[in-house]
Image (cartoon, rainbow, N blue to C red):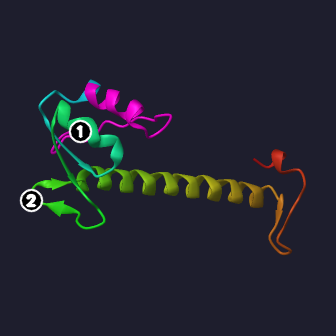
Amino acid sequence: MVQRGGQVRAQVIKNVRAVTVLPIIRENVEKNSEVFTDRASIYRQLWIDYVHASVDHATEYVRDNVHTNSIENFWSLLKRTIKELIFRYRLRIFKNMSRNKCLDTTNARVTTKLDSCI
């Protein structure tokens, strides 16, 4: 979740069900705050404690001040960062394998003892 113009709070959760997500929202968001979401069914009960508005991404992404662009941008940047880190890690392993001659670049074969290369 993200406060507009503020900080992001993210955590790993075991599933994306209302019974899991709503308590986390209640822990982190003051009652009667404005909460903007997409139309996922897990958010249907938010109107009880919050001023809730949603956008249906099948038909719209922004309606007046209601949008999820801030959190969507956060997830996009996080995913890109994770992919870059994985790429760099794999590249480093590849370079180490090549440097330690565990990878035969002329025949594109890898020896069976890769554990000694990493």
Name the residue that disc number 1 marks. Answer: 7
* Residue at x 44%, y 57% (from the top left corner): 80
Residue 28 sits in quarter: top left
- Magenta stretch contains residue 73: no
Q: Camera-side residue: 100 or 55?
A: 55
* Quadrant including the N terminus: top left
For discs 2 and 1, the disc positioned in front in the rendered view: 2
Q: Is residue 49 above or below residue 88?
A: above
Residue 110 sits in quarter: bottom right
State left or right for residue 34 relative to residue 1: left
* Residue at x 17%, y 27% (from the top left corner): 30
State left or right for residue 68 relative to residue 92: left
- Magenta stretch contains residue 7: yes
* Label 2 crowd (10 A; few <14 / some 14-19 / many >=20): few
Q: Give the residue furthest to the left.
A: 64
Q: Earlier in the sequence, mark 2 or mark 1?
A: 1
Q: Where's residue 104, x and y in %? A: 84, 67
Name the residue that disc number 2 marks. Answer: 64
State left or right for residue 37 relative to residue 50: right
Q: Camera-side residue: 41 or 4?
A: 41
**What kind of residue is marked 2?**
Asp
Mark 2 and mark 1: Cα distance apart in space: 22 Å
Q: Camera-side residue: 50 or 101?
A: 50
Q: Which mark is residue 102?
A: none
Q: Please, what secondary structure does the residue beneath circle 1 have?
A: loop
Q: Where's residue 66, x and y in %? A: 15, 54
Q: Give the residue furthest to the bottom.
A: 106
**Predominant SS of the magenta segment:** loop
Q: Which residues are magenta?
A: 1-26
Q: Give the residue furthest to the top.
A: 27
